[in-house]
Amino acid sequence: MEELLKRYVRHLELERSISPYTVRNYASDVQGFLSFLAENGIDSLDKVSRSTLRLYLGWLHERGIARASINRKASALRSFYRYLIREKLVDSEPTLLLSGPKMEKRLPTFLTHGEMAQLIEAPDSSTPQGLRDRAILELLYAAGLRVSEIVALDLNDLDFGSRQLRVWGKGSKERMALMGIPAAEAMKLYLNLGRIKLRGTTDTQAVFLNRFGGRIAERRIQHIIKKYARQAGLELRVFPHIMRHTFATHMLDGGADLRVVQDLLGHTRLSSTQVYTHVTQSQIRRNYLAAHPRSESEKGEQ
């Protein structure tokens, strides 16, 4: 079974356009499942049934694993078995009707305009790393990019004349993203002053570099965002996707058309973008209740 996992990981790395971070997560999820099978005396994937899978998901739930994580593990197993079936490495596909627990509907978390300003201004722009970090934060907010899309940016993807970026999203889908003047200026400063020092003698087309001159990793950007959120004194737990949520929410708050935001985010389905309309409506209601002197008058009359 371990050999099948190695072949699957090679397949993900070589044949599918997914990020190294996703490959690592899927490999870890499948490895966890194989360990569960070994502990329960199951030595072949052909012996796995739907009942086995249900027992595994139940075992994860009993251990207190979050629903989102269980769903991700179920998705990894479906992908793993699809590969095994296609390669004729197993005879049956027990994951065919596998589904994880129902997710609670939660509205996306986002930062206010003031919080976003505090976060963006936190880096020390007197250092190459600070210039890089400021450019990353500006671009995440200005363009609503995924972290994987930031990491994949090359120099020839940038067009400062039109302030556009060529972005490779999920499934290697190409789209154009936009950046405002502050983000463009931060990018120019980084490219002209910071990137040259970080690059050293290395020859790379990657836009954002680590201290060794190589392409920056997704995990490093996650660390950067957490660091500056803490430095800015933000109470909210800030992670990269919050920047994307904030971009979409602020765009809609500012009157942007829903389908324009959909295109900028690279969403295939409009329903993925519509969740942000609920966020803005909720924000409007909170502002009304807090600001209007007679917003609570009905309670007093009852």
Image (cartoon, rainbow, N blue to C red):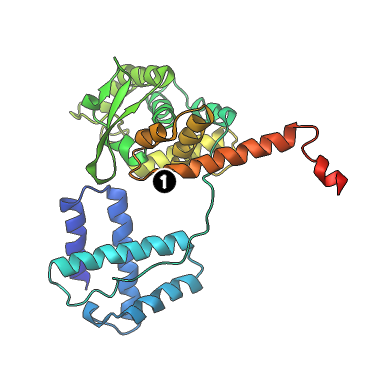
SS assignment at label 1 = helix
As drawn, 21 above or below 234:
below
- In x, y percent, where is residue 147? 36, 39
Q: Quadrant of the N terminus?
A: bottom left
Q: Quadrant of residue 233?
A: top right
Between 6 and 250, the one lying in front of the other is 250
Type of amino acid under label 1: Ser
Residue that lies at the very extreme toward the bottom in this rendered image: 41
Residue 137 shows in the view: yes
Residue 235 shows in the view: no
Residue at the spot 50% in from the left edge and 41% down from the top edge = 276
Residue 209 lies left or right of residue 14; in this view the side is right
Residue at the spot 41% in from the left edge and 72% down from the top edge = 57
Residue that lies at the very extreme toward the right in this rendered image: 301
Residue that lies at the very extreme toward the top in this rendered image: 161
Residue at the spot 12% in from the left edge and 71% down from the top edge = 88
Q: Quadrant of residue 144?
A: top left
Q: Quadrant of residue 111?
A: top right
Between 298 and 93, the one lying in front of the other is 298
- Density class for disc 1 (Cα within 10 Å; few <14, some 14-19, many ≥20) is few
Numbered marks: total: 1
- In x, y percent, where is residue 172? 23, 42
As drawn, 153 above or below 105:
above
- In x, y percent, where is residue 122? 51, 28
- In x, y percent, where is residue 184? 37, 19
Give the residue pinned by disc 1. 272
Residue at the spot 34% in from the left edge and 68% down from the top edge = 32
